[in-house]
Amino acid sequence: MSAELERQVKDLEAERDALWAILAAVMRILVDTATSEWGVGDVPLVQRVRRRLDDGTLPRERPEKVWSGPALYEQGCSGCGDQILGAQRIYVFSLADLPFAFHIGCYGLWLGELVRRGLYRPT
C-alpha cells in the first residue's frame, strides 16, 4: 500500500473512532437523562434496563444477528417487562439459546447501557 493510501486509511480510522466516541457520549447522555415519564410508577425505564443488566436477566453482550419487524403477537419486553403490542416494532435475538424481545426504545437503551459500561463498542 502506498504511503498516501496508508495516511488516508489512518485518517479515516481516526475519524471513525472520533465519531464512535461522540455516539457513545450521546448514548450516555440519553441513558442518563431518561426520566420517569418513560417508566412505570417511580421506576424509570432506564433503571429497569440497568437493573436487569445488573441481575443477569439481560445479556451483557450483543448478538451477531438481530431481527426486527412488526410484532405478530403480544409478548413481554425483555428490557422493561411491559407488553409489546401487535402494532409495535419488535427487536428479537437469541443468545445461548435464550430468546430476547425488545421494544425499539428498550433495545436502544440496552445497547446504550452496554456502550456506557464499556461492554460493547460499535465497529
Image (cartoon, grey):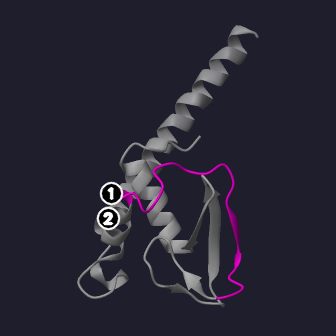
Q: Quadrant of the C terminus?
A: top right
- Front residue of 16/104: it is 104
Do the numbered discs 2 and 1 sit on residues whose CB atoms are within 8 Å? yes
* Label 1: which secondary element: helix
Magenta range is: 53-73
For disc 2, the marked residue is 51
Say above or below: 81 vs 11.
below
Residue 64 highlighted magenta (yes or no): yes
Residue 5 pos. (x, y %): 72, 17
- The one nearer the camera, 73 or 29, is 73
Of residues 13 and 76, the one nearer the viewer is 76
State whether residue 26 appears in this view: no
Side of 37 where 66 appears, left or right: right
* Location of residue 16 with respect to 1 vertically, above or below: below
Residue 106 pos. (x, y %): 48, 71
Compared to 55, does 83 lie above or below? Answer: below
Residue 80 is inside the magenta segment: no
- For residue 102, the mark is none
Q: Quadrant of residue 15?
A: top right
Instruction: Determine which quarter of the picture holds residue 99.
Output: bottom right
Specify whether residue 22 is in view: yes
At a point 68% along the width and 88% down the height, the residue shown is 73
Q: Please identify the quadrant where the N terminus is shown.
A: top right
Kind of residue at badge 2:
Arg
User: Mark 1 sits on what residue?
Assistant: 54
Q: Position of residue 34 (x, y in %)?
A: 33, 72
Instruction: Name the residue at 65% across, 90% down.
Output: 86
Q: Is residue 3 above or below residue 63?
A: above
The amino acid type of the residue labelled 1 equals Asp
Residue at x-position 66% and y-position 49%: 64
Where is residue 63? Give x, y as percent: 61, 51
